[in-house]
Amino acid sequence: MTNVADTAPSSSQSGASRWRRLLRILGSAWELLRLRFAQTEIDLRVFGMLVALAIILLGFNVLSDGKFFVPNNMVTLAIHATSVAIIATGMVLIIVSRNIDLSVGSLTGFVAMSYALLMTDWLPNVMGIGPDFPFRWLIALGMGIGIGAAFGTVQGFIVAYIGVPSFVVTLGGLLSIRGAVWYLSNGAAVTGLDPTFQLLNGGAEGSIGGTLTWVVGIVGCIAVVALLANRRRQRRRFGFPVRPVWATIALGVLACAAILGLTYFANGNYWPAGLAHQYAVAHGITEPDGGLKISAGFPIPIMLLIGVTLVMTWMANRRSFGRYVYAFGGNPDAAELAGINTRWTIMKTFILMGVLCALSAAVASARLNGATLDIGVSYELYVIAAAVVGGTSFAGGIGTIPGAVLGAFVMASLKYGLSFLGVNSPGQNVAAGIVLILAVAFDAYTRRRGGRR
Amino acid sequence: MTSRRLAALLGVGVIAIAGCSANNNTGGSTGASTGASASTSSDCVVAVSLNNYQQPRWAAADKPNIQKVVEDAGGKYIDADANLSNEQQLTDVDTLISQGAKVLILLAQDTTAILPAVQKAHDAGIPVIAYDRLIEDPDILYITFDNVKVGEAEAKAVLDKVPTGNYVLIKGDPGDPNASTFLPQGWDNAGLKDKVASGDIKILNGPDGTFTDAWATETAQANMEAIIDKAKADGNTIDAILAENDSTALGVVGALTSKSYGFPPLSGQDGDKANLNNVALGKQYVDVWKNANELGKAAGQAALGLCDGKSMADLTIDIGASVAPTAGNSPTDFTTPGNKTVKSFILQPTPITADNLGDVMSAGWWVTKDDICTGVKASDPGGKACGL
């Protein structure tokens, strides 16, 4: 009796203490992991988004019996994300500086219709630039970018110098620019773009090919390593703390592996059989069993998106313009008192936005080989959602460009994945809305409790 | 001086109106509806409320034809554009009534949201014509193209071309009864349902196909690209595509182009510029064309008859034989989905393939031969129709 009474509490006591010890070990392991992670200086938010994206993609892969996660599908998904992602890079700066731009969808539609009309009507019939004129596509692209910048300038001027709230100005833009699209073509769809311009559609011929893709991958890898090394040297020079050596090496290896893995994956996307066959016949190549395999590699619109993301990130982080935008977003009065020309800075964000809309319109119209009245409808919502899912805060001052691009990919992968599984649009919208709220809620939660970061 | 001038003016007016009505009376044996007497025609105000001017056909085909029929008979034409808004359209109808409308032609933004406006017209003793789109009210005259027949013509053309194989179904906005009910019913009437049941045809994108929010081209393109990827992953080929209208068909062509898939037979409807061009280029097999010129004429003629005080049952119309109602030129009963019986003129659509593109070119349609033949080579399906 006494034995039993004695042993029972003592055994439970030792059990509890064992648990406590285990928890303590786990806790310190977690602490160590967190510390190590912090030492790599990887943006926790961007990392979280990558994980979320991976979960979404793998989830769809399981639901489709492994048919989803293949190069061909991922390339389509990436192209679907491109138009919104390009604009989202600019929306980050707009929202960071405590403004909003609701007119991006309408502006994209206007410029897309302008491209279509430029190449089918205005250039050949008004300016005498026929189909054989060299670099005709570039002339059209330049004019489109000019149109985008012009609209951006007008809206930016009204916001920055006249002081009308950007919500109102761009809401007006949303309505009136969309209306103006109608007047361009009387509502008719216009098709028939320049063949070179059409390469922006990212199809088999609108991709850079296997060899060039490897070149891009390897150059990217070298650039990352050089960047890491350079940053380390710079910090040491100015006596700033540097990452531990292991963290720098791990980061470099990881980034290189990711880039080269992506390159390998993209090269697993082959030309459609019919097109490869035509190519083989035209070039007198004897086809092996199972047809000729030509790697498509990175699509041109994705190259454009990568370029836009790099340039925008560089401008946001390394140029005074970008720093002014964040300074203004963090504290407008302080920025003003510090002598920043805040009005000119704000106006520039809108001009930049117009240019990005024109680039996005180029991809959208190339994909359709023309333009319809409804190109770009609701883009403003997808773009703002992408920026917000990517960690941009409406309070101003906070937001990253790679985050917004990732946000666009998260939203596009949901839409594409559900489409792939045969879920119709109402279901897609339900899912997109829930993910939007979840992402922002998660963000708010981590920000509130994680004062350390 | 002034009184003499006034008298002269009046005289000219009377002669003009008399001449006009005389013309109409002798012009067509069935032209009774336009044979309005001089006194009523001159104060016949035909009011048209369109839900939108966004598609080019309204401004280019429907409006001018209604206007011409009405004004040729000495009537007055007024209109308003509701810009896709239910509320705006209710306001528009109020305004048109206060402007002295004697007949109201309504292209409703919504089949039921428009009912308060219809009731106001009834209260004012104004007959209402539901133009192109049904209104759920027992006292209207319904003038439209047969949407079930449109679906039938789409599916028949494609099924004749591809009797067995893998099909993709691209539908319009899930909230539009044309997209979810009438057009698919036409597809089934043409034999799609039986062929699916017998296993001759397999639908690659689920039993119901894929809907396209707001009939948007970009959405249709994104959906179609996902369907092509899925087919590729499953090892299926796409043999034919039924798209409900031209804006979605245009998105399908965009997807097929960017995926370098080639162009399996594809349907559409509306007779839009880009799509008729695609028919000539061999990128779209059939475009079911609703000649809205004739629809406008029919509505104008019916409106004049109603102005004259005729009852809806006594109306007759006189339009081109190829689109005239199968039931003839007198109204027939039509049962609405809400189980109301209304009088109707239901016109017939014309399927256009590369072989009969000439029918559109010669009809005075807003899409010209130049539009249709842009970039067409002699070896393309439409080469012959384009005179190459």
Image: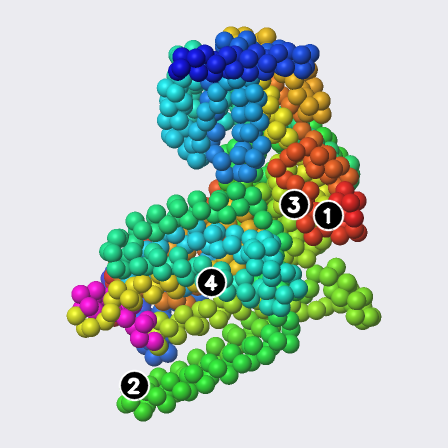
Q: Amino acid at mark 4?
A: Ile
Mark pair 2, 4: CA separation? 43 Å
Residue at the disc numbered 2: A241
Mark 2 and mark 4 residues within 8 Å of each other at the beta carbon: no
SS type, badge 1: loop
Q: Nearer the viewer, mark 4 or mark 3?
A: 3
Mark pair 2, 3: CA separation? 67 Å
Q: Is residue B341 left or right of residue B360?
A: left
The reply to whether residue A362 is in sight is: yes
Residue at 75% from the left image edge and 45% from the top image edge? B386
Mark 2 and mark 3 residues within 8 Å of each other at the beta carbon: no
Mark pair 4, 3: CA separation? 28 Å
Determine the chain carrying the residue at label 3: B
SS type, badge 3: helix
Q: Amino acid at mark 1?
A: Gly
Nearest the viewer among A217 and B127 is: B127
The location of residue A42, given as percent across then percent down, is 38, 74
The residue stretch that appears in magenta: A319-336
Label placed on residue A145: 4
Residue at 63% from the left image edge and 65% from the top image edge? A133
Label placed on residue A72: none
The location of residue A74, given as percent across then percent down, is 57, 61
Determine the chain carrying the residue at label 2: A
Residue A172 vertical position relative to residue B67 in the rendered view, above or below: below
Mark pair 3, 1: CA separation? 15 Å
The location of residue A69, given as percent across then percent down, is 58, 61
Q: Amino acid at mark 2?
A: Pro
Label placed on residue B371: 3
Few, some or many C-alpha atoms within 10 Å of disc 3 (few <14, some 14-19, many ≥20)?
A: some
Q: Are marks 2 and 3 on the same chain?
A: no
